[in-house]
Amino acid sequence: MGQFLHLKRLPSMLLCSHLITYFFRNSKMASLINSFKHVFISLLFLCAHDMLQVMAQWPKGGSTRFYDFKVQMLKVTKLCHTRNIVTINQMYPGPVVYAQEDDRLIIKLTNETPYNASIHWHGVRQILSCWSDGPSYITQCPVQSGQTFTYEFTLIKQKGTLFWHAHFSWLRATVYGALIIYPKKGVPYPFKYPYEEHTIILGEYWNKDLVQLERNVLASGGPAPVAEAYTINGHPGPNYNCSENGIRLYIKMENFIACLGLFIKIGVIIGSAFGLFSLFGTEPIFGKSNLTEPNSLTYRRNRI
């Protein structure tokens, strides 16, 4: 209960106390509230009732997991061109965030680039933690160059494969990664035990500077240009110029009914192992042709 009432985790309570103090110190507002005091008191009781309901459902026994995200530049060579891209920890795609249902995540974001940045945790419900949702100028100010922001939220009754991505400008085209939430220990798989685990993230790649590209699109009023390549885990396929030859992964497409409408040719990564490629828990929804906000799927082997 003490954790729940901590003001850092419930800034709305602190905000309410400031507002109430302001209202009663201001004579005009105090007079207005006095006229509608019954309505005001009813609203307070309603808010208290809702908070007590949430408190009763607050998870117990989850772990707290810490991640350190540094927004950094990385020089990459793809499609016969070399350029600098924005990444997390100089990884493209970024690091996978692992957790279990009801765990608390604390992610420290440090911006070491000249651009503003923020991270959106796509699909996380953010119960009593909307200030950690990440959309710039909506739930937070963007993290400026040289500054730090700490995201803190609890994965209340959530499990499955989600993802995170930048939420400022078009940086999300290179700043993204998977968020894998395992069920609690002892929960059986709803399908045959998987042979192996790999995370597959689909994205798009432009040779141009993404920030300048966005400015050009906004200035022209026209549509965004088509990406030079589609990527799997940050790599263009062998049909693109200057692509490296890799080993090949064959996936037996059983239990893939949830992805009808999305047809993927996968010719990538890891050889000779056949596996069951299934969705677990939270099912991604595919309906857009624009993969700038990446969609991630995982078939899994071990739990943490």
Image (tube, rainbow, N blue to C red):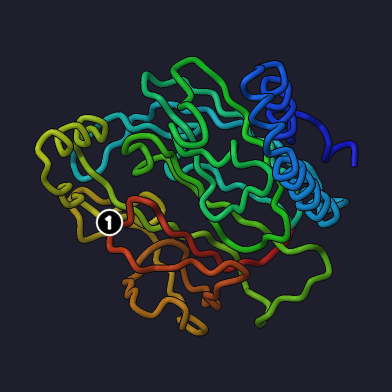
How many numbered dots are placed on residues in this image? 1
Q: Is residue 285 left or right of residue 8?
A: left
Q: Is residue 126 left or right of residue 261?
A: right
Instruction: State the residue in front, 131 or 16.
Output: 16
Q: Nearer the viewer, residue 239 or 126?
A: 126
The structure residue drawn at horizontal position 56% and vertical position 28%, both measured from the top left corner, is 109
Which quarter of the figure has residue 238? Answer: bottom left
Check disc 1 and report its element: helix, strand or loop. Answer: strand
Residue 278 to residue 180: above or below: below
84 w.r.t. 99: above or below:
above
Residue 41, position as x, y percentages in the image: 77, 42
Q: Tell me where residue 25 sits by quadrant.
A: top right
Residue drawn at point x = 42 percent, y = 76 percent: 259
Quarter of the rendering occupied by the C terminus? bottom right
Residue 287: percent from left, percent from top: 35, 68
For the N terminus, which image quadrant?
top right
Left or right position of 230 against 175: left
Q: Residue at x 45, y 76 (%)?
A: 251
Residue beneath label 1, please? 230
Q: Is residue 301 left or right of residue 1?
A: left
Label 1 environment density (alpha carbons within 10 Å; few <14, some 14–19, many ≥20): some
The answer to which of 134 and 24 lies nearer the viewer is: 24
The image position of residue 110, as x and y in percent, is 54, 23
| The residue positioned farthest toward the right in the image shown | 1
Q: Position of residue 160 (x, y in %)?
A: 62, 63
Q: Is residue 64 above or below residue 268?
A: above
> Identity of the amino acid at label 1?
Tyr
